[in-house]
Amino acid sequence: MKRRVIFLLALSCPVLLFSCVSTKKFKASEAKYADLAGKYASLQSKLDDCQRSLRDTASAFERSRNLNEERLEGLKQNNNTLLNQLKDLSVISNSQAESIKKSLDNIGAKDAYIQDLQSAIARKDSLNMALVMNLKGAIGNLDDKDINIKVEKGVVYIDISDKLLFESGSYDITARAKEVLGKVAKVLLNQPDIEFMVEGHTDTNPFKRGVLLDNWDLSVKRATAVTRVLQNDYGIPPAHITAAGRGEYLPVATNDTPEGRAANRRTRIVILPQLDQFFKLLEKK
């Protein structure tokens, strides 16, 4: 009898063990699936928000353009009506009417020119916002203290803190910095006409090491270090990049506190406005 019980137990143990192991694996897979599903839903939500914002911007631009065209057409009709009324009343001669017509046409042309400029500015603002959203989407959820992307007065700025890019007092790029710069480069490469400036900034604490004479030297070396990574590692054409050192002379915060000095130690990528397009608009046709 005892032998029979022992035999049955020996047969049942592997089955129970297999059942326990399978259940644990199943629960682990279930949890992993739920986590991936949550991340996918979050990314899909962010993508939907970006697409919705772009559609809203495009719609607003189209409504503004249609409104401007209607106003211009209304102005032309009013000019013609006024001119015909003056002729009918015999208040002015034909030559005077022709002179007035030319003046009114010039006013209409200037108004159209102003509308063209406004449309160009609106289009540029829309492209800048799309660029900012693409950069934020590519970089992901980094701490705002480490990287900040913004638009000021029609110019896109990417500020990256020195602790993300360099070791203290060094201009050697860290491994984590190359990862971030690679994400920025991917977006910039999709805009082949973009030109940008890489600016190095420091705090006011004196620096002198090796061949570097001061903070200005350090800021220049850090700027050129970033440009070399963008060029050599990620293939951005060097003709599109300008490297500049600002030293301590363009602070964004006070240098009297550790927090302020940390904010001032940064590398800034400035997307340069394409002024040649606006100069072409200013040329006489």
Image (tube, helix red, strand yellow):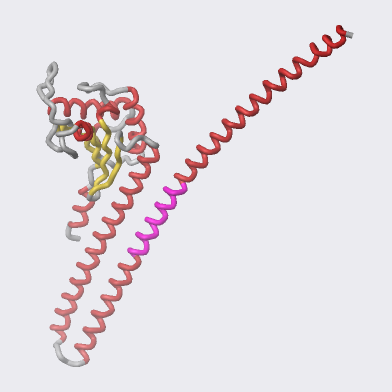
Residue 207 quadrant: top left
68 relative to 145, above or below: below
Task: Determine if the magenta segment contains residue 45.
Answer: no
Q: In this view, which residue lies farthest toward the top?
A: 3
**Which secondary structure dominates the residues rendered in magenta?**
helix
Is 46 or 83 nearer to us in this picture? 46
Q: Residue at x 13, y 16 (%)?
A: 210
From the top left corner, tell me how far across and down residue 163 is, in percent. Answer: 27, 27
Give, as a single range, the part of the protein colored magenta: 48-65
**Residue 241 placement, left or right of 139:** left
Q: In this view, which residue lies farthest toward the right?
A: 1
From the top left corner, tell me how far across and down residue 97 is, in percent. Answer: 16, 83
Q: Residue at x 19, y 88 (%)?
A: 86
Q: Residue at x 44, y 52 (%)?
A: 52
From the top left corner, tell me how far across and down residue 261 is, in percent. Answer: 19, 32
**Residue 215 placement, left or right of 159:** left
Q: Quarter of the image containing the C terminus? A: bottom left
